[in-house]
Image (cartoon, rainbow, N blue to C red):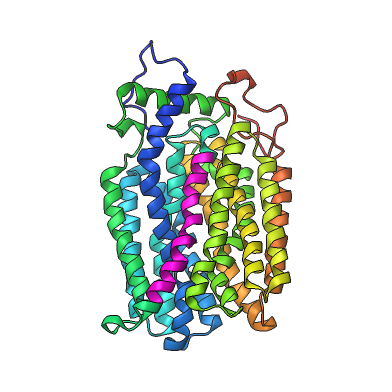
């Protein structure tokens, strides 16, 4: 983080928990609302093909294999450009990055209305992945420039709340648009869906350029003492967690914890992406209409939001990460497994999916509170991008895997068991790889900040 523009006078403000809480509330209200809206449209443009396929099948004659590959190929472009995009963000700032990313992906998503062949479908899905690369990990890196470790789980939960809330918008919106605009102005319902969800993304990129600040040093909406206080808390946090300011790209790539977090993220995200793309089809197979599918999808989304906020807040308050993640992942696995028992009962199946959503969303929130506790500066940008790249590669696997298993078995039961097993393995790896507490409590002296039991994957400082 560039703090050259800030100076710390000898009489810098002393620690005041109430004042600090008010300061970070101010920061959160400035950053989070817009970033959350952007994340909602990120979700919509990434996964709207899951709803669009319900009509595209009849209009274009695409089968499960085409949609499975199209859903997955997005993540090939995404994975290839994730790290370069985040490294560029560290150099040019979040404002210019969001303008580039959101403007271009929004236009590419809107261009899906012109698709008529599988090749065009694959090409645009790949391009959207390339253009979108770096958004979510970029925002997570952005949080490390503003929030100390012990405040990061809750703000991460609030950010991921947008991703969890997106299905609340996505389902009903897709159902309404595809039902009532089908045929309007010679466009099919699925074409209207891509158009109405793509263009706003480009407009939000422009808005973000003018509203956000690249870091505390550039935040003229904070007073000078407030900017100094944020910088001091971040420096103290890095010192308490043993993070070296020079922790750069190469060091992040050599850090085994980065690769372990990537693997754990991959296992957890398998379930997220599988459900994002195939949940509408699963519900429709139970006899629901397109409109009903859209509204039933709201229940798991709401449950996931509520659970992630509660779990994230409790994890920040206690400073504990390991068991919060493990228990949440196991709850997610339980929900997916129970869903297999109610494949012909839509209401019971949705309740099981809600349980799964609560667990997976909470685990994902805890997972992303960890990288900022072990990495700093360009190392944080590179490490977060690498973790996200490895995790997001689950998007290459999950849709195709579920589609292939569905074609072979005629249902989703086997897939749900596989996704459950992945979550159990993620819980086990996290428990074995990371210590009980990943961040110091701000109220503790620095000498007590580091846990006595070091992670078996943590290398000694040189």
Majority secondary structure of the magenta segment?
Answer: helix
Residue located 36% across and 66% down the image? 197
Please say whether residue 380 is one of the residues in the magenta stretch. Answer: no
Please say whether residue 170 is one of the residues in the magenta stretch. Answer: yes
Residue located 33% across and 64% down the image? 106
Residue 422 visible (yes or no): no
- Name the spot of residue 317 as percent of width and height, x first: 59, 32
Residue 303 visible (yes or no): yes
Can you say which quadrant of the picture contains the N terminus?
Answer: top left
Can you say which quadrant of the picture contains the C terminus?
Answer: top right
Give the answer, above or below, for where 250 lies relative to 151: below
Give the answer, above or below, for where 332 lies relative to 339: above
Rendering quarter of residue 436: top right
Q: Is residue 58 left or right of residue 208?
A: right
Nearer to me, 240 or 143: 143
Q: Is residue 304 left or right of residue 84?
A: right
Residue located 42% across and 71% down the image? 174
- Name the spot of residue 277 as percent of width and height, x first: 53, 70
Task: Count how many numbered circles sit on residues in the image.
Answer: 0
- Name the spot of residue 189 as percent of width and height, x first: 37, 79
Which residues lie in the magenta part?
154-178
Residue located 46% across and 34% down the image? 147
């Amino acid at each position: 983080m560039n703090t050259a523009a800030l100076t710390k006078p000898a009489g810098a403000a002393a620690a005041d928990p109430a004042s600090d809480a008010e300061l970070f509330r101010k920061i959160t209200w400035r950053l989070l609302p817009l970033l959350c809206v952007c994340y909602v449209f990120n979700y919509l443009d990434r996964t709207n093909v899951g709803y669009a396929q319900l009509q595209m099948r009849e209009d274009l004659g695409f089968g499960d294999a085409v949609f499975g590959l199209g859903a997955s190929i997005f993540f090939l472009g995404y994975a290839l450009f994730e790290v370069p995009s985040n490294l560029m963000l560290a150099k040019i700032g979040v404002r210019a990055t969001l303008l580039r990313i959101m403007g271009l992906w929004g236009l590419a998503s809107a261009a899906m209305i012109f698709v008529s062949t599988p090749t065009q479908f694959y090409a645009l899905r790949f391009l959207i992945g390339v253009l979108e690369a770096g958004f979510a990990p970029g925002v997570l890196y952005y949080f490390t420039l503003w929030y100390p470790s012990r405040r990061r789980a809750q703000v991460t939960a609030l950010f991921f709340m947008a991703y969890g809330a997106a299905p609340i918008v996505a389902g009903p919106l897709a159902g309404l648009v595809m039902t009532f605009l089908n045929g309007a102005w010679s466009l099919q319902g699925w074409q209207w869906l891509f158009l109405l969800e793509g263009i706003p993304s480009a407009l939000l990129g422009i808005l973000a350029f003018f509203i956000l600040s690249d870091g505390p040093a550039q935040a003229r909406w904070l007073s000078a003492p407030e900017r100094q206080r944020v910088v001091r808390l971040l420096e103290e946090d890095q010192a308490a967690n043993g993070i070296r300011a020079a922790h750069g790209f190469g060091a992040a790539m050599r850090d085994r914890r980065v690769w372990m977090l990537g693997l754990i993220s991959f296992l957890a995200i398998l379930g997220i992406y599988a459900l994002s793309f195939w949940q509408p089809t699963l519900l429709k197979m139970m006899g629901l209409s397109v409109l009903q599918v859209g509204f039933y999808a709201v229940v798991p989304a709401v449950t996931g939001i509520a659970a992630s906020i509660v779990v994230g807040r409790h994890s920040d308050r206690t400073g504990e990460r390991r068991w919060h993640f493990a228990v949440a992942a196991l709850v997610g696995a339980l929900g997916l497994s129970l869903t297999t028992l109610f494949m012909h009962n839509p209401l019971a199946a949705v309740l099981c999916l809600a349980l799964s959503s609560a667990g997976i969303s909470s685990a994902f929130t805890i997972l992303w509170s960890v990288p900022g506790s072990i990495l700093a500066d360009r190392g944080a940008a590179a490490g977060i991008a690498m973790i996200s790249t490895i995790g997001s590669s689950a998007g290459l696997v999950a849709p195709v895997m579920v589609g292939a298993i569905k074609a072979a078995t005629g249902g989703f039961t086997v897939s749900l068991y596989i996704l459950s097993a992945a979550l159990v393995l993620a819980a086990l790896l996290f428990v074995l790889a990371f210590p009980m507490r990943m961040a110091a409590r701000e109220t503790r002296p620095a000498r007590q900040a580091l846990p006595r039991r070091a992670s078996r994957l943590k290398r000694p400082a040189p």
